[in-house]
Amino acid sequence: MSSHRKDLQYMSIVKNILNNDEFLKIKKIEHHGISRYDHSLKVSYYSYKIAKALHLDYEQTAVGGLLHDFFLSPEDRSQKDRLKSVFTHPKQAVNMAKSHFELTKKEEDMIRSHMFPINLSVPKYAESWIVSMVDKCVATNEFAVKFRFRLKYAYNLFLLFAISVIKF
Ligand SMILES: [Fe+2]
Ligand SMILES: [Fe+2]
């Protein structure tokens, strides 16, 4: 995704976050088959565009969307830890975001409630609903791409196996 770079207004809102050393660490973390940084950027930019079209607070939406998954996790997490993280990471992200940036109540709410209804923190603002819904759409798309890739990989393996069986 590069269209956000050409959007100077968007870039001026988020540049301090994108240049933050701690935030840059999520570039190295895998998330739905891409990096957590790229996922966060997509959620932030699409949410910002929707908020702007609806005459809502697009600046806070851009920030809340960008920080919604701002948490660090080890690469070798067990399946159990990954599952647990589905429920716990919004709170982790709020704590991380608050320790590196000054958050408004609305931005904090966007991060805390983005996993609703999986966790029970109900979004309190229209902007929080936007981030939560955009996150679900973006994540669904990312999982679909990741899953298709796996299917293709499995199909290629099957073909290789079938060819080797036919040869013998
Ligand atoms: Fe999340
Ligand atoms: Fe997310």
Image (cartoon, rainbow, N blue to C red):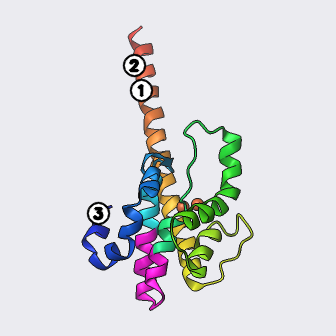
Q: Can you tell which quarter of the image residue 161 is in?
A: top left
Q: Where is the C terminus found, in terms of image quarters?
A: top left
* Residue depicted at 57% across the width and 64% down the height: 99
Residues under numbered marks 1 and 2 in contact, where contact means CB atoms less than 8 Å apart: yes
* Residue matched to label 1: 159
Foreground mark, 2 or 3, reads 3
* Residue depicted at 52% across the width and 64% down the height: 100
Q: Can you tell which quarter of the image residue 155 is in?
A: top left
In the picture, the disc for residue 2 is 3
Label 1 crowd bin: few (<14), some (14–19), many (20+), radius 10 Å: few
* Residue depicted at 44% across the width and 34% down the height: 153
Residues under numbered marks 2 and 3 in contact, where contact means CB atoms less than 8 Å apart: no
Please tell me whether residue 134 is drawn above or below residue 33 in the rendered image: below
Q: Residue 76: give x, y in percent of width and height.
A: 58, 36
Query: Is 55 covered by the magenta stretch?
Result: yes
Q: Residue 3: give x, y in percent of width and height.
A: 29, 68
N-terminal label among 3 and 1: 3
Q: Secondary structure at mark 1?
A: helix
Q: Amino acid at mark 1?
A: Leu
Q: Amino acid at mark 2?
A: Ile
* Residue matched to label 2: 163
- Indicate which quadrant contains ligand 1: bottom right
Foreground mark, 3 or 1, reads 3
Label 3 crowd bin: few (<14), some (14–19), many (20+), radius 10 Å: few
Magenta range is 44-62
N-terminal label among 2 and 3: 3
Q: Secondary structure at mark 3?
A: loop
Residues under numbered marks 3 and 1 in contact, where contact means CB atoms less than 8 Å apart: no
In space, the residues marked 1 and 2 are separated at their CA atoms by 6 Å
